[in-house]
Every structure is written in structure tokens, then in C-alpha cells.
Image (cartoon, helix red, strand yellow):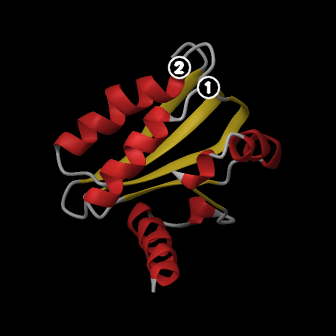
Amino acid sequence: SRTLFMKVIMADYEEQYAIIELIGEWNDAIENDIMELKREVIDEFSNFGIRKFVLIAENVLNFHSSDKEYYQEWYEESIDNEGWAVILNMPEATQYDFKKAKLNRYIELMEIGNWRTYRPFHLFKKIDETLSKRLD
């Protein structure tokens, strides 16, 4: 979109995960960023078997919500395919707006300090194990 940029850090088709860094302003209200992200990126990765997504959002400084439908759709598809989506290290002020819209029901918010010191696979495993422990 015009306000939210992304960089795919890693996509592992065997382990079925992708790590994506987001930068800028996440604006669902005007730019419909979640629709673009879901249709143009997530659905494309899903077509190739990716079912677990780490969205690094430490450089997403604003969030403006709109409808929940794309988040809900992504959540339901993830559950059906034993997948998940995590937003990592979103700034506190941005998290406030995300939580206010109750979108954390669909995408897990998580904090991991010094995530850059992990290799992509180890970061994925750390998040996957944390989520698995919560389910047990």
C-alpha cells in the first residue's frame, strides 16, 4: 500500500512458515491494508503451503482500524489448517489501537526482545513452542 511497506525475511516451504517485517502506517480505514496484505501476500503464501506467519511490527508506528472480516477470515483459515499468525514487537501505542479494535482475538500479539539475534528458523521455533505451550 502507499503507507505500509513489507519485507519478506524468510519463507520456509518445508517448515511452512514465513517471517515478514512491516514498516510504516497500518491503515485499514483508508488504505484497507489488511485486505491488501491478506489477498496479495498471505493468500499467495498459503497457496504454497505456508500456514504460520510472523509479522514483525516494531516499525509500525500507527494503526487505524476498520472492519474485522479479513482478520477473522485469516484466523478461521489458520485454525482449519493448524496454522497461526503472530504480530511481533508492535509498539505499545500501536498495540493499544489494535487491541481497542479487538483484533488481538484473531492475531496474537507477542514480544521477543532482540529478535534480530535469532536465525529465522530459531525465531520461528521459539514462537511456535510458546504458542504450543499455551494450547497444552
Q: Dividing the picture into quarters, in which one does residue 98 lie?
A: top right
Most extreme residue toward the right is 93
Q: Residues within 10 Å of mark 2 (few under 14, many from 20)?
A: some
Residue at 65 percent of width and 29 percent of height:
65
Which amino acid does the dot numbered 1 rest on? Ser
Where is mark 2, residue-wise?
Answer: 32
**Percent x, y of residue 90:** 69, 48
Tell me: 49 left or right of 98: left
Above/below status of 64 relative to 49 = above
Residue 133 shows up from this direction: yes
Mark 1 surroundings within 10 Å by alpha-carbon count, few (fewer than 14), some (14 through 19), many (20 or more): some
Report the amino acid beneath label 2.
Asn
- Kindly tell me whether residue 107 is visible in this rendering: no
Image marks 2 and 1: residues in contact by CB distance under 8 Å = yes
**Residue 43: x and y, percent?**
28, 36
70 or 110: nearer the eye? 70
**Separation of disc 2 and disc 1 at Cα?**
8 Å
Q: Which residue is mark 1?
A: 66
x and y, in percent, of residue 9 in the image: 42, 46
Residue at 18 percent of width and 41 percent of height: 47
Query: Does 35 sit left or right of 101 as displayed?
Result: left
Judged by depth in the image, the label closer to the viewer, 2 or 1, is 1
